[in-house]
Amino acid sequence: MILVTGASGKLGRAILSTLSQRDVVATGTSRAARGDLRTLDFDDPESISLRGVDTLVLVSAGEAEDDVVVARHDAVITAAERDGVAHVVYTSLTSAGDHLGFALAHRWTERRLQQSTLSWTILRNGLYADLFGSLLGWSGNRLTSAFGDGALAAVSREDLAEAAAVVAEAPHRHEGRTYDLVGTPVTAADVAEHLGVPLVDVSLDHRRQELDRAGLKPFQPAMLMSIHTNVRHGFLGSPGPDLGHLLGREPGDTLADVAAATGAPRASTPSDATAR
Ligand SMILES: NC(=O)c1ccc[n+]([C@@H]2O[C@H](COP(=O)([O-])OP(=O)(O)OC[C@H]3O[C@@H](n4cnc5c(N)ncnc54)[C@H](OP(=O)(O)O)[C@@H]3O)[C@@H](O)[C@H]2O)c1
């Protein structure tokens, strides 16, 4: 049996949905009791049971400080070792993302898996297309960006889910492999052109001040700023072959997804957005 964690979330749900169209037995988990999903809370190690699971698709639960995320992932991998899970597929972070503020917990989890008694496959997922779009802003009808000329090799969750399903249904073929799953490079200028709106480049300082005013969780501004500076300075824009190899086709074009995630232009608002 295949068990997909985080199946109430967007990626886990898409993985489970893809697996449901294949000739395998798969179910998912959530912390809350929801429909057919099994209840599983990484923050409650004593309660974790993975008995009967052959392949665990461990979708990262990363929305927290590193010590919390590391403890979560350690708890579930420890349970997988104890309960006789044969293979773990872990959704990690693209190789180019080593400088991102949330890379450490992913790399720690990869190392924990590699040193475990388990058979494993690591899926180093690129950044989601809609995340990129959501980090662009609006000043009236002008799109604002702190990404400069930098590109993101943005990827859709649908493609990542299909790749995870391909691995999970035949894990022995992917044992001990690490795949770097990135999509097609997209820039803020591509998005502005797609939407037919002007683009204003803002500084990192400008974007940081906006994030500081946005009422985010304490760890979030630093994480999001790390995405801005990595893209701006050219660290996350390179495509790669692994996603296409797993899918057996070219990854989908993500420009429309990025554009949709920017939201509709807000009614004209004053902005101190300035060119670099
Ligand atoms: N590559 C990227 O661009 C990117 C961007 C953002 C996040 N991520 C990472 O990718 C993961 C999946 O993305 P997504 O879009 O599907 O996120 P999502 O929609 O927010 O879903 C997150 C899932 O994590 C589960 N979860 C959270 N805390 C948990 C815990 N303590 N124990 C067990 N499950 C827990 C949630 O389950 P319940 O709430 O139902 O318990 C939910 O199903 C995220 O969790 C994050 O680690 C990647």
Image (spheres, grey):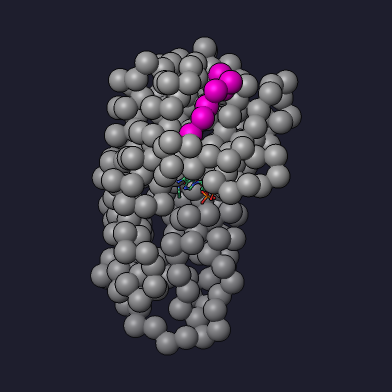
Q: Is 105 contained in the magenta span?
A: no
Identify the residue at horizontal 52%, vertical 12% (top origin).
172
Identify the residue at horizontal 50%, vertical 81% (top origin).
140
- The quadrant of the image that shows the N terminus is top right
Q: Is residue 212 left or right of residue 49?
A: left
How many marks overall?
0
Q: Is residue 152 above or below residue 161?
A: below
Residue 68 placed where, x, y %? Answer: 33, 47
Most distant residue in the top direction: 172
Identify the residue at horizontal 43%, vertical 27% (top origin).
79
Residue 135 placed where, x, y %? Answer: 43, 62
- State whether the magenta stretch is mostly helix, strand or loop: loop
Foreground residue among 195 and 3: 3
- The quadrant of the image that shows the C terminus is bottom left
Identify the residue at horizontal 34%, vertical 29% (top origin).
110
Confirm whether residue 240 shows in the render: no
Residue 159 placed where, x, y %? Answer: 58, 37
Please tell me in which quadrant of the rendered image residue 53 appears: top right
Foreground residue among 127 and 4: 4
Residue 64 placed where, x, y %? Answer: 37, 52
Highlighted magenta segment, given as a residue range: 48-54
Confirm whether residue 108 shows in the render: yes
Q: Is residue 64 left or right of residue 27?
A: left
Foreground residue among 241 and 167: 167
Q: Is residue 159 left or right of residue 273?
A: right
